Image: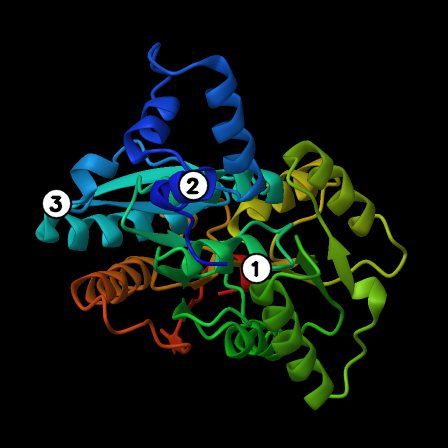
Amino acid sequence: MPNISMKMLAKELQLSLSTVSKVFTDSHEISEQTKQKVLALAKQLNYVPNPYASSLRKRKSKTIAVVLPDVADSFFSVAINGIESVARDKGYHVLIYLTHELLDRERAILSEFQSGRVDGVLISISNETTTDCHITDMMQRGVPVVFFDRVCEETPTTRITTNDRESGQLAAQHLIDAGCRNIAFLSISESLPISRNRLAGCRQALSAQRLPFGADNVVMCTDDEAENVQIIARLLQRPDRPDAIIASVEKLTAAVYLACKQEKVSIPDQLKVISFSNQNTAAILNPSLTTITQPAFNMGKMAAETLFTSLRKSHLPLKAETLVVPSTLIVRESTGK
């Protein structure tokens, strides 16, 4: 749907542009009847008033938005630093928005941007996001979008990711090389590409060694740490307790350590643990944590640079492509170093 303008509303209602404009500033000069007529059509046509229109006719907002699922994962705080390093050089402000892993919140945030509040958006989607309609709608209204880390694979724009499938395979192979034969994979989503790809890589490594890996080896966790502790504790109480755990996201790490403490399971003697994490305290945990560490700063920086290239060359749309920055395995004591 093309952008609905105030001028189009005025033409449709056979009113002057100034009259329609005054409706949206709630001017006392306009009758209540006229106001209701204009507002009803605006709602019908999904017109979004632009409070910054007068200034934006001459200049851009000089602001970009970064939409994140949460900030509990240190990946995002490091990525923000990468984004800020680019935005600062370009003379732009950065607004941070949190969806708290809620699709409805993500939709509401993106709808605000249609009024011209920001020039472009960098987004890492929530774990509830399975469709991109709200994202493509914003793109069609002229707001460029670049994904980083958590992406919608079908959206026709640029995506900055790491090599999640290969990293999942690397994590599992490291545990296999350490003697593990019954590996559990902790996930937070069945739909997020990062979760699916990391799991696929893990499954591939185990399959290559003809090691069993069934539905019971995949454990779904939640956004509540206390609940996750109990989920993992039940996993450790099984008669066929796993000898290794892969935590697919950083925020599951604490729950693993707490569950092991609760169940008196020794890391790494009885259970080896590896986590996808950028946690700067990984080296001082007891035992220190083996991690798959993402290049968070570089991913944030690359996402910002890609967005600003699009803003500078507005006649060139963003390419529908995936740019991959490899992650790194850092071996520490939790896997038996």
Tell me the amino acid under the disc marked 2: Leu
Please give the label number shown on residue 9.
2
Q: From the viewer's perspective, is the residue at label 2 or at label 3 nearer? A: 2
Tell me the amino acid under the disc marked 1: Asp
In this view of the protein, can residue 314 be seen by the observer?
yes
> Tag 2, which secondary structure?
helix
Q: Which residue is mark 1?
A: 132
> Tag 1, which secondary structure?
loop
Q: Look at the picture and state if 28 lies above or below 308.
A: above
Q: From the viewer's perspective, is the residue at label 1 or at label 3 nearer? A: 3
Q: Which residue is mark 3?
A: 58
Q: Residue 49, image x and y in percent?
A: 39, 35
Left or right of 116? Residue 155 is: right
| Nearest to N terminus: mark 1 or mark 2 | 2
Q: Residue 175, image x and y in percent?
A: 60, 72
| Nearest to N terminus: mark 2 or mark 3 | 2
Quarter location, residue 171: bottom right
